[in-house]
Image (cartoon, grey):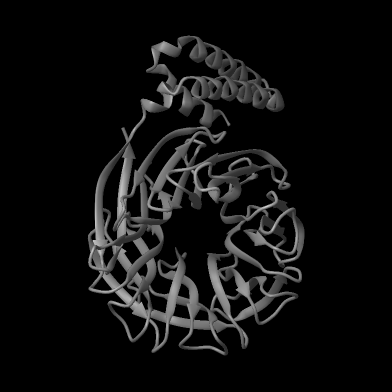
């Protein structure tokens, strides 16, 4: 908590116009430090919370505070051929470069194939690999593994048992396939997110139409280090339910976010599920109103709560009379109880695609919208500090994934649409000025 407060106070120091707010917040930080040193940790936490409260009130009432911090593009790169290429997930690697996965029909064996690209720290391509067969195959998520290789999750129509199966691919550090596994039945099944677990295995989430209780269910699969299934669980009711993101939690359990049509208040609600290490439900929560609301990304925060993002489809556009989507950011405590929420919109509609807690205690967000995509930085209470938008009527970048780098900058991937109909994988690095 103290780290967060000190970070935001650094921004206030340079803004003499808000000296009163700075002094008040700084007083609470000093009081918190004294309580902390005397062993009164609860009192210290309350004091730090007070400092954050004063700071955020100054931000909300004085837009000039956030306007003083602006994002700046460091570099941008595109990768691809003369067909369709898209980056769906990016992660910084231990050597300071980046690993990107996604989809391509510019290269590979046929239809759409899984695309894996490794770059150096400046975004220069070091190598690329494709995986797939004669039909459509693609990847949704990639993570560097403890052995320096990569684990990829997505879907395959070329292999497996049914219409589409969950596809798990393990590579070595050079992107060469070590093994791959498919999971699924006769109907449509897809993997959305994967994480390496503490025992060296993998946890996968996605959706299944082959198993479970309804039209589609949330599917949770645990594997050993060789990708062999140890157990699986389904979550859902009689309607459509699916998950988009999973993270391993500090208690060796899992946190999952997606949407449910079977439970909650509306057509679709954000669905947050906490499980233990064996995939048993500890608790689940829904968030939403009478219309469609979805969750797309979740991250455990430093206070052991959760930050989740998606969209809320609950407002009517005054001109068109249509329902419009707002990016929806929700913070919960460790038990999934909502602490606060914020909505943002850029252009005609916005959907939150990716969220991560940053080193200063705030959040970095990727937003996708109709003709306008954005990267947004907020403080610890979801108050926007800055945004950078991309968009025009034709060929604007589509943002899919964002991550803070080790040096406090931000990198994101997606797709850039060319005017001739082809698209390329996009990688952009930005920093704060």
Q: Horizontal placement of 391 versus 142: left or right? A: left
Q: x and y percent of residue 274 in the render?
A: 70, 57
As displayed, is residue 148 above or below residue 385? below
Q: x and y percent of residue 161 in the render?
A: 57, 90
Name the residue at 66% across, 82% down: 210
Residue 411 versus residue 229: which sits nearer the camera?
411
Name the residue at 69% across, 75% down: 215
What is the quadrant of the N terminus in the image?
A: top right
Residue 177: quarter of image: bottom left
Q: x and y percent of residue 230 in the render?
A: 66, 78
As displayed, is residue 269 above or below residue 82? above
Name the residue at 31% across, 82% down: 108
Name the residue at 28% across, 77% down: 106
As displayed, is residue 50 above or below residue 326? above
Q: Horizontal placement of 167 versus 80: left or right? A: right
As displayed, is residue 357 above or below residue 7? below
Q: x and y percent of residue 192 in the render?
A: 54, 68
Specify whether residue 122 is in view: no
Specify whether residue 422 is in view: yes
Residue 89 versus residue 86: which sits nearer the camera?
86
What is the quadrant of the C terminus in the image?
A: top left
Residue 228 versus residue 403: which sits nearer the camera?
403
Q: How many marks?
A: 0
Residue 420: quarter of image: bottom left
Q: Horizontal placement of 122 versus 344: left or right? A: left
């Amino acid at each position: 908590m103290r780290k967060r407060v000190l970070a935001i106070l650094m921004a206030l120091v340079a803004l003499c116009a808000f000296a009163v707010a700075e002094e008040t917040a700084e007083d609470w930080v000093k009081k918190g430090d004294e309580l902390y040193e005397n062993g009164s940790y609860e009192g210290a936490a309350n004091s730090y919370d007070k400092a954050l409260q004063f700071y955020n009130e100054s931000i909300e009432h004085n837009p000039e505070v956030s306007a003083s911090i602006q994002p700046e593009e460091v570099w941008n790169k595109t990768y691809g051929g003369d067909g369709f290429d898209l980056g769906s997930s990016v992660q910084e690697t231990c050597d300071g470069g980046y690993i990107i996965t996604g989809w391509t029909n510019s290269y590979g064996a046929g239809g759409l194939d899984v695309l894996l690209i490794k770059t150096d720290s400046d975004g220069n391509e070091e190598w690329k690999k494709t995986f797939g067969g004669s039909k459509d195959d693609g990847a949704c998520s990639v993570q560097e593994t403890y052995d320096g290789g990569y684990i990829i999750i997505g879907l395959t129509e070329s292999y497996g048992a049914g219409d589409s199966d969950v596809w798990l691919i393990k590579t070595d550090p050079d992107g060469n396939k070590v093994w791959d596994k498919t999971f699924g039945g006769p109907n449509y099944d897809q993997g959305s997110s994967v994480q390496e677990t503490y025992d060296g295995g993998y946890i996968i989430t996605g959706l299944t139409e082959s198993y479970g209780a309804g039209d589609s269910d949330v599917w949770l699969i645990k594997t050993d280090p060789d990708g062999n299934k140890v157990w699986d669980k389904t979550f859902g009711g009689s309607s459509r339910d699916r998950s988009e993101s999973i993270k391993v939690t500090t208690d060796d359990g899992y946190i999952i976010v997606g949407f449910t049509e079977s439970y909650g208040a509306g057509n679709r609600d954000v669905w947050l599920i906490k499980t233990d290490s064996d995939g048993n439900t500890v608790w689940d929560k829904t968030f939403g109103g009478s219309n469609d609301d979805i969750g797309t990304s979740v991250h455990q925060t430093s206070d052991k709560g959760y930050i989740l993002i998606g969209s809320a489809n609950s407002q009517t556009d005054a001109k068109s009379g249509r329902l419009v989507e707002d990016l929806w950011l929700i913070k919960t405590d460790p038990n999934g109880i909502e602490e606060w929420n914020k909505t943002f919109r850029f252009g005609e509609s916005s959907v939150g695609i990716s969220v991560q807690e940053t080193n200063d205690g705030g959040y970095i967000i990727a937003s996708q919208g109709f003709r306008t995509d954005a990267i947004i930085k907020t403080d610890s209470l979801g108050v926007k500090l800055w945004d950078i938008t991309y968009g025009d009527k034709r060929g604007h970048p589509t943002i899919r994934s964002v991550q803070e780098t080790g040096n406090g900058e931000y990198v994101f991937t997606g797709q850039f649409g060319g005017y001739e109909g082809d698209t390329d994988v996009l990688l952009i690095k930005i920093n704060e000025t």
